[in-house]
Image (cartoon, rainbow, N blue to C red):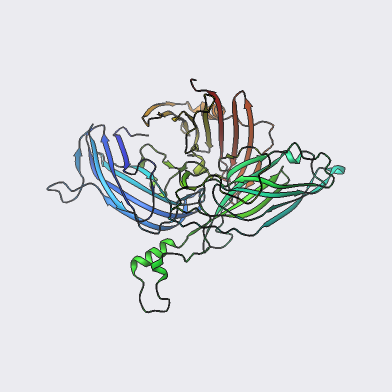
Amino acid sequence: MTDSVISKFEIQLDAGPEPIFKGGEVITGKLQIELSRPIVINAVKLQMKGRSVWLNDPMKKDDIEKVLFDNDMTLLERPPGKLEPGHFTWIGNFTYSLPFECPLPKGCPTSYEGPYAYIRYFIRASLVHEEDNGQVHEYYVKQAFSIVSPSDGYLVIGESQSVKDSATFGSCCCKGKLNAELNLPKTGYLPGEAVYGSLKIGNKYPKDILNHMEVRLVDRVRRIGAAEIAAASPWRTLLYRRLEEEENTPKNRKEGIQKENLQLLTIPSVCPTTKGDFDSVTNEVHQLIPNGRLLESPSTATLRFRKQPFLKIEYAIQLTLGVFLLLEVPIDIGEHSTKDHDIKLQHFVAGAQTVEERDESGKIAINGPFTYTPVYPYKDNVTSSVPEPQTYSPAVPTIQEEQTIMNASHSVVEREIQNDSPSEDGKTLVRTVKTVVTHVDGNETKTMEETVVEQDGSFTRTIEETVLSADGIEKHRIEEISIDNEGHQDTKIEEVENVVPEEEIEQRKKEIIEETVELPEHQEASAVITSSEGDQVTVYSEETEDGGAHTIKTTTVTKHSDGSESTIIQEHTTIEGDGDD
């Protein structure tokens, strides 16, 4: 939201709106400021930060962090005759442009974003303004950027691994014991590589069990060096697929069911698993004589510290059989060589991520909340020695099943990095993604509905937000951003504020939620998870066909331990229509 005093406050990097860097490069750009009226500016500051953070308690923002670098700059020069910068008037309706540059240190690890931990790099500009009555306001803008650490390629193939489990199903005289085993021929994969496995199911099982098989790629983070219990986050779902029963599956299965060469999923664009070799730094560091008397230089020691992992990123594949069994196999995801010309950088499968910092509380964000989408090296159709897959349904990225309330209130729709192109028969694929977020507690009721439509390279994003505070102030905001296939952008914003009478506040809260959210009725949950913090997360998945529209809808309802509740609904719709529509 733009403050009435500030017409424009932007960070423009020379590397473009979605910059990607590596350690050792120099970041250059300019800060543009335009005021709606003349005001006194106390200071203009620029910060460039890199941090590896473990969110020990995401609800309370109780962080444990490792600072990778921290550069502070003051862009406001001291005017002639003044002993200190600031305290002079800036004119209105004029665009000020303040250039800057700052080198990135070497040895920065690859970016990672999650609800419980992150490795984040960002630039933040602040403008400090003091009113005539002495009240001080600090406005800020922010831009996060991806760092992809240089790599020659890394992969641990791993040995085959099996996991088995059993559960009781049915009731009374119809009880039975379901036994299942999942086997992977290896546990190391690269982004873009298909994962195959074999599944064995005993001779007792629910008759429709093959119609309720789902597979997920999940990740979690551990804080290296901390106690096992205190430093492992819950699993987060990154990719979800429903496996279909093949027509040639035998109907009479008295000996049980065995499926070989079953394609579970394809590894998407994600951050690599943290390497086990935590001492790997650089050649010059390894050349230091272990028992020599030569002291390590400050720069080398800093590089060694920066390269030492603080967070350990882990992955697993989970296969669920209805609501009875969950089979989980840990896997390692390697990294492609950044020197390979066939490698492309692709957006993170979980989409855009919010970037909030604890020290921003009390400051005024201009055009926030701020988001960005990390990118990682990816290669299509990575070769595998496993035979061709059986029939399966398309893989669909989903929202995070275990989102914390802080992330849920600012969740942003995910989108693909490449636009769809017209098909050979003259038709065009129109891709629509819709995200609905709600949050209710004792202080306010929030809803956010975001819709993204992509067609023929054009892009339209509409965000509709409603906030009702405990004292009856209702704010409604609609923002529409359109970008055509030539890159031209148009933004429209509408804002309305009104007061709800005290006796109608509770009723209005219900109406806001009902107007935005259509919860699934009489639908069996895909997963019910209780986190270590006591939050209960229920996930519903639904797939529908309506004419030429194919929609996959995922609803996540989180009942938080503090009594509040939040709902995230994501619809991913693909419509095949005429290009002239």
Q: Residue 73, position in %: x, y?
A: 28, 51
Q: Is residue 510 visible?
A: no
Residue occupying the far top of the picture: 580
40 with respect to 466 (left or right) = left
Q: Residue 577, position in %: x, y?
A: 54, 23
Q: Residue 214, position in %: x, y?
A: 67, 42
Q: Is residue 119 visible?
A: yes
Image position of 193 with respect to 515: above or below: below
Residue occupying the far right of the picture: 173
Of residues 248 and 225, the one drawn nearer to the viewer in this rendering: 248
| Residue depicted at 53% across the width and 35% down the height | 438
| Residue depicted at 37% across the width and 36% down the height | 367
460 with respect to 507 (left or right) = left
Image mark count: 0
Of residues 239 and 159, the one drawn nearer to the viewer in this rendering: 159
| Residue depicted at 16% across the width and 51% down the height | 83
| Residue depicted at 23% across the width and 38% down the height | 96
255 with respect to 469 (left or right) = right
Q: Which corner quadrant of the image does residue 141 belong to? A: top left
Q: Which corner quadrant of the image does residue 174 belong to? A: top right
Image position of 112 with respect to 244: above or below: below
Q: Residue 76, position in %: x, y?
A: 22, 46
Residue occupying the far left of the picture: 81
Specify the quadrant that holds the N terminus: top left
467 with respect to 560 (left or right) = left
